[in-house]
Image (cartoon, rainbow, N blue to C red):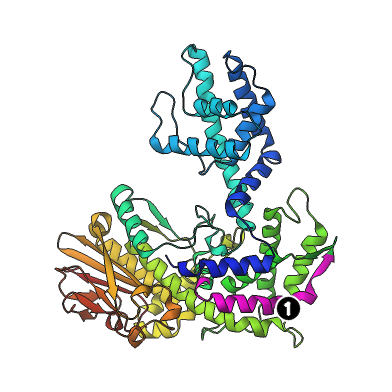
Amino acid sequence: MLVDHDAEGAITKIFKRFIGHSLHFGHLVYAKKRLVMRISLANEVNVLGSMVDRLSEQNRWFRDYTLEALARAVRETIACFPVYRTYLEPGKPVSPEDGAVIERAVAAAKRRNPAIEESVFNFLRDLLLFRFPENLDEEQRAAHAEFVLKFQQFTGPIMAKGLEDTAFYIYNRLAALNEVGGEPNFFGLSVEAFHKRNQQRHRDWPDSVLATSTHDTKRSEDVRARMLAISEIPQLWGRSLQKWRTANRRFKKQIDDAEAPDAGEEYLLYQTLLGAWPVDVDGMPAPSVSPEFVSRIQAYMAKALKEAKLNTSWIQPNDNWDNAMVDFVARILETSPRNKFLPLFLPVAEEIARLGAINSLAQITIKFTAPGVPDVYQGAELWDDSLVDPDNRRPVDYARRREMLKEVEHVPAGDLMRCWADGRIKLHLTQRLLHLRRDNAELFRGGNYEAVNFGGAFADCAIGFVRRHQERATVVIVPRLSSRVGFPPVGERWQDTHAILPSGLPALRDVFTNRELRPENSQLKLSDAMAQLPFAVFCSGGL
């Protein structure tokens, strides 16, 4: 929802132009799942092939199928599997959802393999859907069921290794979308779809976890929030990439008729630097970085290159290529009058850091108030620039957080925004909303969910909803695409933009400033609602 969907075409063209070729995500995942099955999980797939071969021997209609044909049908169907796994159980009906997944996977495998007899795939499909021949005895039925269960166990790790641990490090069009459970080819969600999904979650899964950072995320919530902001500035992003490439070309090395790092690796590196670049207390990007930061980026890129398995890998490391990337990172981050990259990079880093901060504050405001149970990953109470493990498992400075918690109690809300870079505003937001949930458990556990519409100049740049339970209600409003509004998106920057609230809401009290606002004709001006802070949570009904 924080991605500018309208920029998809522009960002895709920039990515294609920079790496020098187009990259179809679906074809890439298919190829990398096949790679994983050929190398790291070959034994598991061979076991499945042997199992289905034995099953075919039990039926005179299918016993002529060769082991190779059956094993290939298994591999191809897994490579085309659109989800991690199905959840079939012997003796129970196949759900429409699982049935559709299997039909879709087999149909795709047939399409990609016209040289394999169609009946081989049909045999496998019927096995996976528990459509067993009627003349099977109990032992044979048990063997068929065991195959289905084993098949379900293998599709998950193959998807994880092919998608998350390979394709996610290659298809870097907007790398913030390359997250566990995410779909990098799905560029943004409309506000309407966002509200619909929240309503579905409230109806079907009200106690599911809302996590923005975990031990397994590819990058922290704040790094992702910054990188998502690239979608808001496609023209600046495209121009900057060309300038950065030109400035840094002299730091590349020629290895076996190829430039190291290659264009895709360089593209990921620039996004990573924008996502993790440190800012000072005034919110300005640091003009130089510490050796520790350089080492972290080098370690991250070393992992990214090996996971991509294009020029180096864990099982066949290319030391020359790995060292070229280590040297490239060190050279472009070196503080030197001869380094032309940093002066070109820092203005973009400043813009991204600001937009990313607003994205992050909007994201966690929603996380604490939307249907579901919010989770805070330890250390993410302040700005967190962590990348993938082991970077995101660094020790947490709890003493600093305890000290800052004491400070925020006495700092006016407006001052927190002016000093946004020190992280206290995120800590204050987290604390206040946790207290709100604790004091109004029933509201957030069972309260309904109503979308809020907006009007005015920046109606597309705000998102809001109301949670109601009996006589109590809370109104939540946050910005999106804030580059259009300006930084920070507070006060008069919103011009005539207003929220159209549901009827029946009385006076509203601001959770953060304790102000009281009264909607006029069910309308609430955002210049009032977000007069000091780039988020607003109001309560009514004696909360």
Q: Nearer the viewer, residue 394 or 537?
A: 537
Q: Is residue 310 above or below residue 140?
A: below
Residue that extends furthest to the front in the rendered view of this protein: 114
Residue 395 visible? The answer is no
Q: Residue 435 at what x, y percent from top left?
A: 31, 66
Q: Residue 16 at x, y = what percent?
A: 64, 65
Could you tell me which residue is drawn at 50 percent across and 44 percent down? 83
Instruction: Choose between 75 and 336: the one closer to the eye.
Output: 75
Q: Main secondary structure of the magenta part?
A: helix
The crowd level at tag 1 (other Cα within 10 Å; few <14, some 14-19, many 20+) is: few
Q: Nearer the viewer, residue 108 or 229?
A: 108
Q: Is residue 140 above or below residue 146?
A: above
Q: Say whether residue 398 is left or right of residue 322.
A: left
* Amino acid marked by disc 1: Thr
Q: Secondary structure at mark 1?
A: helix
Give the left or right position of residue 454, taking residue 35 as reference: left
Count of numbered circles on the image: 1
Quadrant of residue 286 within the rendered picture: bottom right
> What residue do we see at 64% from left, 21% from top?
65
State the extent of the magenta-drawn residues as a range. Answer: 231-254
Left or right: 266, with 25 as reference point: right
Q: Is residue 246 magenta?
A: yes
Identify the residue at image location x=51%, y=55%: 183
Q: Quarter of the image containing the C terminus?
A: bottom left
- Would you name the residue on which mark 1 appears? 246
Foreground pick, 521 / 406: 521
Q: Is residue 24 visible?
A: yes
Residue 362: x and y in percent read 40, 70
Q: Residue at x 46, y 25 (%)?
A: 130
Q: Quadrant of the N terminus?
A: bottom left
Horizontal and vertical percent position of residue 103: 48, 35
